[in-house]
Amino acid sequence: MTNARISNRDVSVTDGRVPFGPYETYWRAVGDPDADKPALLLLHGGPGSTHNYFEVLDRLAAETGRLVVSYDQLGCGRSYMDGHPELWRAETWVDELENLLDALGLGHVHLLGQSWGGMLAITYLAERGTEGVNSVILSSTLSDSQLWGKEQHRMARQLPLDEWEALMRAEETGDYSCPAYQQAIDHYMVLHCADPHYDESAPECLRRAKVTGGESYVTAWGPNELTPTGTLAQWNYTDRLCELDLPALVISGTDDLCTPLVAKTICDRLPQGRWELMDGCRHMCFVDDNERYCRLLADWMDEHDRTQACKKPC
């Protein structure tokens, strides 16, 4: 494991890499490694996005006195690699998460998964158990890929007719290269996900160039959010959510890709579930209303901290 320490707004930032089979996973930790509270471990979306947008949550390290850890999942960012489509399935990323927890020596954590990261958190907890996890935060995520696809189609019908028809033509023909399709999907994502380009007033981490995992996204999910056709197409843990008997916070926005039906489907089946619906927020609630999101997380983690000594990275 390698690491380097830099300064970031009066909090310590440590990053490095841990071996994962023949590959490496890049990680980043903000705050005091010796803090006596459970760390917050962040699982980004995609598959194929990066940790970058989670840097808007760095403030929680200072505000809550805990370590905030994120990482780039295999296939994107500083853990980028491609040419191995056989890797892009849930098991790979679950193994990587378990490997990272072991390598960093994180004893107890609050586990936050956003979008695909929430799917990863659910899979990990159901398949590997809840030991060492104080609570789970499921942010703008899902428990059933096909339900997600149906809800995206329902919302996309509200687009202008020519854009809806362009989406349907692409889906029917399998040709997603048409400019009309690209215009339609871009409009849909602006409405329900995030702006494609942020101006100078936005945090630097949102404007920074990043290496996304196109191969991992298309192979694991599909061509767009409406069309789950990859290795995760039949992913469905709805009936297993009852096994996750730990404090669980579901967060979604009123304008989110994660619709109220999707969020309620999750929350209703969690033994200790709570749902927070954030007004005016899209898929990245932590960006659209950073103040409220951070207050919510700080209060939630304080409520569900335990006093056990927790190991920290480096």
Image (cartoon, helix red, strand yellow):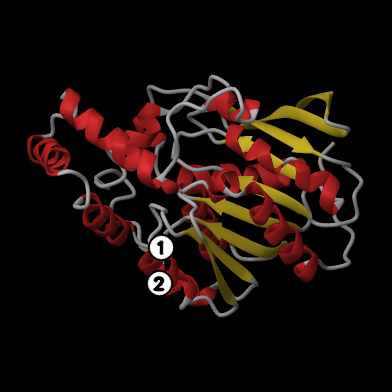
Q: Which corner quadrant holds the C terminus?
A: top right
Residue 105 visible in this rendered orientation of the protein: no
Residue 13 left/right relative to 169: right
Residue at 30% x, 37% y is: 187
Q: Does dot 2 land on a helix, a strand or a loop? A: helix
Q: Position of residue 219 (x, y in %)?
A: 32, 36
Q: Amino acid at mark 2?
A: Thr
Q: Which mark is residue 143?
A: 1
Q: Is residue 233 above or below residue 103?
A: below
Q: CA distance from mark 1 to mark 2?
A: 8 Å
Q: Amino acid at mark 1?
A: Ser
Q: Residue 189 or 16: which is nearer the viewer?
A: 189
Q: Which corner quadrant holds the N terminus?
A: top right
Q: Does dot 1 land on a helix, a strand or a loop? A: loop
Q: Earlier in the sequence, mark 1 or mark 2?
A: 1
Residue at 58% x, 43% y is: 287
**Mark count:** 2
| Tag 1–tag 2 contact (CB < 8 Å) | yes
Please tell me whether mark 1 or mark 2 is closer to you in this view: 2
Q: Position of residue 207 (x, y in %)?
A: 56, 24
Residue 76 left/right relative to 20: left
Residue 222 left/right relative to 258: left
Q: Which mark is residue 265?
A: 2
Q: Residues within 10 Å of mark 2 (few under 14, many from 20)?
A: some
Residue at 79% x, 38% y is: 30
